[in-house]
Image (tube, grey):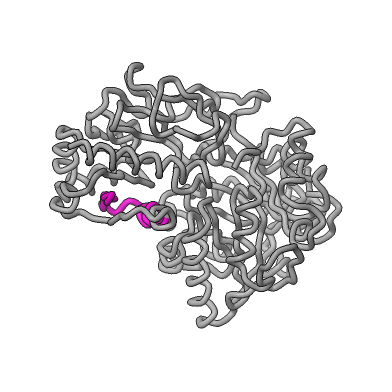
Amino acid sequence: MLSKRVIPCLDVRDGRLTKGIKFKGNVDIGDPVETARLYYEQGADEIVFYDITASSDGRSIMLDVVDRVASQIFIPFSVGGGISTVEHMRAVLLAGAEKVSVNSAAVKNPDIISKGAAAFGSQAIVVGMDVLKVDKSEQIPSGYEIVIHGGRKRMGLDAIDWAKTVEALGAGELCVNSIDADGTKDGYELTLTRMVCEAVTIPVIASGGAGNPQHMVEAVTQGKATAALIASIVHYGEYTIPQLKQYMSGQGVKVRTVW
Amino acid sequence: MLAILDYEAGNQTSVLRALRHLGIPGEITRDPAVIERASGIIFPGVGAAGQAMQNLTNSGLDRVLRAQIELGKPLLGICVGCQILLDYSQENDTATMGVVPGECVLFNPALTDEDGQPIRVPHMGWNSVQRKAPCELFEGIADDAEFYFVHSYFPSPRSEYVLATTTYGVEFCSVHGRRGMWAVQFHPEKSGRPGLALLRNFHRYCQEAQDAQ
């Protein structure tokens, strides 16, 4: 039986973590590799790196981070943020990542999805969707609209239609991030998550809003997601990954508990 | 030294990184002399069966591999490398190596999971492996250990080659082969400690086989 995945997400800028991360042990709190290793040892099922680097210098530093992670951490990981060409995808995958995640670039140029899938296989292409709740309209019948640039730009694109489009283009997985729920710690946007899950047949990661392990249970039961992305609840030491998994398991959710 | 067969499969560097971490000498190679000298061969694979088989045939590595298998060289096929040891793959309607009798078939998305929900394809994530026959690869690995899978097609070899199964909508063969020639559908190089232990077991078997000669 397939386990539901617990996936910590690390924001990286110029090779360093962007948020202070609190935990015990002799680890450099600013080093994404050490933090990823800690999560690996705690039983994270996968790790997502979100690269918010602006400069090309920083991008080559990120490739070095990817290489170091791949040499020490033997679970899958993906890299997203600013990936807009097949060449960039290739560089990240060759450096050792399993998957690349495209978001804004896919909205602006959906071809990147099919080109990436043709070059590296669908399993390597994750499409990240930033979604805003809006009034239902003819253009946005689901009431969920795709936004880019961290939620600042509305695209006039229905999130459910977009999910089906990217699946048809060859995406291997979706990561559905609710802009409304992101950072609130009030729980995932379950209606949105469920609607996307019911619209596509590829795996779906719920993202945005996790404040406690019950939220994660809801994401994979009511939300029907196959994985739950988490950030601050582990970064600031409120919960450890084993605690989250133990809770989920106690609620009847199948999670990986031997590692 | 373990030879990692270089036929432009996506995960060959990941396999090499895992071996390095374990202190196991390994080399990504397409040189027949290096492959012949190796104590064992890892046959990796990510991507589509059609392209993989084409790369293998064009480079002549299919003949090298077949010859080594006939000589009894230990082999570990991974993912697509596990699938194309069979006769045929539904993926790209591909005639494959035919080392193990059987074929590779697509998950039927009409299948449902334990909760009655339709399964999602690809089968992506961590799943357990039920052992059906003794296998040196799993020595010292907990029965309930999980491994990382990512695939849309699964191997369906003749029953006497089934060494372990996994359930995802359907119970499918996740490890096949015979002693010294194994193939795993999951990715040991991405399966944390149990995966690393499996690679270490394979290397130990290869060394013992070489020492015995």
The residue under the point 37% across, 57% down is: B13
Judging depth in this view, the residue of B28 and B194 nearest the camera is B194
Tell me if residue B58 can be seen.
no
Q: Magenta region: which residues?
A: B1-17
Q: Is-magenta flag for residue B144?
A: no
In the rendered image, which quarter contains the C terminus of chain B?
top left
Q: Is-magenta flag for residue B3?
A: yes
Relative to A12, does residue B165 appear above or below in the rendering? above
Judging depth in this view, the residue of A115 and B7 nearest the camera is B7
Residue A129 picture quarter: bottom right
Judging depth in this view, the residue of A104 and A62 nearest the camera is A62
The residue under the point 64% across, 23% down is: B114
Residue B156 picture quarter: top left
Relative to A33, does residue B38 appear above or below in the rendering? above
**Residue B107 located left or right of residue A244:** left
The residue under the point 34% across, 46% down is: B44
Where in the figure is residue A155, as x and y percent of width and height? 67, 63
The residue under the point 23% across, 55% down is: B29
Where in the figure is residue A99, as x and y percent of width and height? 50, 55
Farthest residue toward the top?
B159
Tell me if residue A171 can be seen.
yes
